[in-house]
Image (spheres, helix red, strand yellow):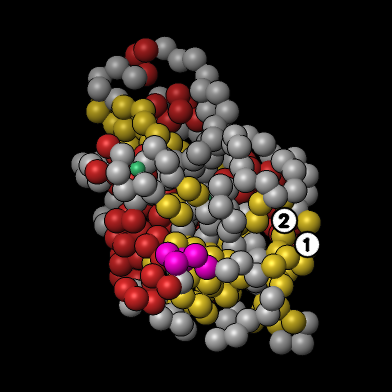
Amino acid sequence: MTHPETMRAMVLEKSGCPLQLKQVDVPTPSPQQVLIKVAACGVCHTDLHIVDNELPHPKLPLILGHEIVGTVVELGSQVSQLGQFKTGDRVGVPWLGYTCGRCRYCRSGRENLCDQPRFTGYTIDGGYAEYTVADAQYCFPLAAAYDSAEAAPLLCAGLIGYRTYRMAGNDVQNLGIYGFGAAAHIVAQIAVHQGKRVFAFTRPGDVEAQALAGKLGACWAGDSSEAPPEKLDAALIFAPVGALIPEALRHTNKGASVVSGGIHMSDITAFPYRLLWEERVIRSVANLTRQDGEELLQIAPQVPVKTTVHRYPLHEANRALDDLRSGRFAGAAVLMIRQTPESGWLAE
Ligand SMILES: [Zn+2]
Ligand SMILES: [Zn+2]
């Protein structure tokens, strides 16, 4: 397939500044990479943390975006030898862009903790652009069950959300979810499908997110400052608000886990030891393994998980980030890379 030499991309030149629409070179795939024509790219809270300078040492200038759905248009020499992908294949690219394969974490099934990782849309360029390159070993084949916009949120909100949910353990009946955004709205559907009772906690007064939670099968939805009607066996925290950890602990049963799914959080407020007593656990979740991705992408169509997406054209990435920051929509924001005024949203 042929492709142009340059492309439109939304570029972060400097932390703290808005992204800029630029015409840049289409990247050339290395032997291990594929060149992908991007159809859609999800907008994640982590993108906000990068723009807001809350995560150290991003690549600069940087093309954000780590929930990429697109079509393979060119293969690196090694990829074509291995026959792993062919041009025309539909793929998804997640946050985990590369691991060393040699460190003690990689060798023990914990590549999410690799000592020398690279992350899409953070330390390598991502999908807020018409084209991107990605290491073929870290791309997922995508089934046709989802259109590009609907598939995009699965690739981070879904994957990290699923890992967070898994870390809560199996012996969970009542599951609390704090921060009912993109990750929560996917995880809630899986949890309900698996017979859990979901209690959804939103920003105070966010009736839109509470209504979405109810629609997706939550048995209760309320403000994060409220007490649920029953004690929780586990709580997942997706809002970057440290005060929610003691708040969630307060409502848990003995032996419960409180799992934080985000990469950045405000300081956790001090709390009395009795809230942690009786073998309650607080833990974080970092990144994802490829196995998490394979599992989630297999489970999602079985549930079936339906994502609620808000589409923005590529050049309005700053507005999408701003709306995410202010909680102006329920569900997930997705950039549609190819849009014309006449034809509306062109996914492929
Ligand atoms: Zn490693
Ligand atoms: Zn993300």
What distance separates the C-alpha of mark 1 from that of mark 2?
6 Å
* Residue where numbered disc 2 is placed: 11
Q: In the depicted view, which residue is nearer to us: 4 or 221?
A: 4
Look at the image and tell me in which quarter the N terminus lies. bottom right
Task: Count residues near mark 1 (Cα–Cα under 10 Å), then give few for <14, some for 14-19, many for 20+.
Answer: some
Amino acid type assigned to the residue bearing label 1 in the image: Leu
Q: Which mark is residue 306?
A: none
Q: x%, y% of residue 302?
A: 30, 70
Q: In the depicted view, which residue is nearer to us: 157 or 256?
A: 157
Q: Is residue 311 visible?
A: no
Circles 1 and 2: CB atoms closer than 8 Å: yes
- Residue at (78, 82) in percent of width and height: 341
Query: N-terminal of the two: label 1 or label 2?
Result: 2
Height in image: 221 above or below 263? Answer: below
Magenta-colored segment: predominant secondary structure = loop
Which secondary structure lies at badge 2?
Answer: strand
Quadrant for ligand 1 reads top left
Q: x%, y% of residue 32?
A: 42, 64
Q: x%, y% of residue 340?
A: 74, 82
- Residue at (40, 25) in percent of width and height: 250
Q: Is mark 1 within 8 Å of ligand 2?
A: no
Task: Count residues near mark 2 (Cα–Cα under 10 Å), then give few for <14, some for 14-19, many for 20+.
Answer: many
* Residue where numbered disc 1 is placed: 21
The part of the chain drawn in magenta is 29-33
